Amino acid sequence: MQEVGGSSPPCSTIEIIHHIGYAVGIMFKNYIQKKLEKYTVKYLQAHPDIKLICVAGSVGKTSTKTAIATVLSQQYRVHMHEGNHNTELTAPLAILGIDYPGQIRSPFAWWSVFRAAKQKIKSPSDVDVIIQEIGTDRPGDIPSFGRYLQPDVGVITAITPEHMQNFGTIDAVAAEELSLGNFSKVVIINRDDIEGRFAQLLTNPNIDTYGTSGMAEYSFVDEDFSIEEGHKGYFTNPEFQDNIHATLHVLGEHNVRPVVGAVAVAIRFGMAPEAIVRGVEMIRPVPGRMNTIKGANSSLIIDDTYNSSPAAAQMALQTLINLPAPQHIAILGSMNELGASSAAEHERIGRMCYPDQIDWVVTVGEEAAQYLAPAAQANGCPVKSFPDAISAGSYIHQFIEPGAIILAKGSEGGIFVEEAVKIILHSIDDNEHLVRQTPEWLEAKSQFFSRF
């Protein structure tokens, strides 16, 4: 019986054990993190010829790092982790080229990692360039990488709303992402997707800019475009007297920008124009990022299902609208992690949808249904909302016209719009081109969809 007016009752034994276990877990994680940072520093010191490129930004990190790797690999031995290992524990392992242990709570698994790290330090280098993505969930994540890393080049792709429940304001996001530039030797930023007012946050004087609008030192002038061939044009740059002509096999202006960033890095690394052109013409969309796939009834699917944010959704919708087709369909899933700005950002995307440009808007998820769908409907668009992607895909399959273009866009957690895409594909063989199709992901999604 609790005593009236007395102190709170003591914790139960189970609660005490839980708190102790949590504290021990935090201490163990911090120990692992410090060890990994130390080994990373020693590795880079032992191999001073290795150049480190780090990529940060609200959107476009994976496409940008992949583009850089593709171009630089024409002349250099390049190491890049293909996944999104960009946190305090995974990033050092990605730099070292060591697999993340399956048993993360096992000291023995981590001792094996440490042994592998020591061997990496002692062994001759097998790479010339390491390209590492670094991410953030909350303020301070990216500056923490500056404790032990000094990238030769830092590339910052965009400043847009992300994890707003933790950052609160776009200015806080900008301070976080741009901090990479202040502990890099050289910083290259996307001039088109980073507001000029944020330049004051950069203390590093060694700045280059890239983009497609013509405001940057490194830019791409688009002379011709077709879905089959891509963007034909040329790169402007301050180094070469002649412009660099190439054909880019990507879709949408926002996917041209990562290629321009890769060209800026390649020129900084002393590559010849011929090698740069070979590299950029090899670049293809990353699965789930504006990747085109054949759909049912001779339709074309723009698969942009890896994740979603306001800026990425806006650019994807604009690309859909600009492509000529007898029918335009937009599958728009909820955008996660927007915090207090979620309603306004979803409404803004909905207001981009007009019936003379988009024939059907189909939403997936609660927030898209609550905020995006009414805004599109108010413009006069036919709209249908579903709680899950499988139902959305089944619905769309009924009215796809020959030659239609279908945009599929949505966030990862609890949205999984790639499962809608799976239903409207021309061939099940193309399942392998979709994101999150590993046995582990399929099992997790099976459990998720069983609720509907």
Image (tube, rainbow, N blue to C red):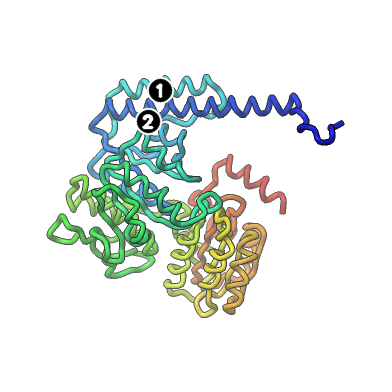
Which residue is nearer to you in this view: 10 or 64?
10
Q: Which residue is mark 2?
A: 96
Q: Where is the N terminus found, in terms of image quarters?
A: top right
**Residue neighbourhood size for the residue with mark 2, other residues' Cα within 10 Å, grouped as few (<14), some (14–19), many (≥20):** many
Q: Quadrant of residue 99?
A: top left
Image quadrant where residue 106 sits: top right
Q: Residue at x 74, y 28 (%)?
A: 11
Tell me what residue is drawn at x 58 percent, y 27 percent. Answer: 25
Residue 356 location (% of width, % of height) = 51, 80
Kindly indicate whether the residue at mark 2 contacts the one at mark 1 (C-beta within 8 angstroms): yes
Percent position (x, y) of residue 282? 31, 52
Q: Which quadrant would the C terminus be assigned to in this image?
A: bottom right
Q: Say which residue appears at 66% left-offset and 62% top-offset.
A: 386
Callout 1 amino acid: Ala
Q: Position of residue 134 (x, y in %)?
A: 41, 43
Reading the image, the residue beneath label 1 is 116
On the picture, is 305 further left or further right than 62? right
The image quarter in which residue 95 lies: top left
- Circle 2: residue type: Leu
Vertical relation: 326 (above or below) 102? below
Q: Residue furthest right?
A: 1
Disc 1 to disc 2, C-alpha distance: 9 Å
- In the image, residue 176 sits, relative to residue 406, either above or below, namely above
Marks 1 and 2, the one that precedes in the sequence:
2
Q: Residue at (32%, 41%) from the top-left corner?
A: 183
Nearer-the-camera pick, 282 or 90: 90
Left or right, 58 with reference to 265: right
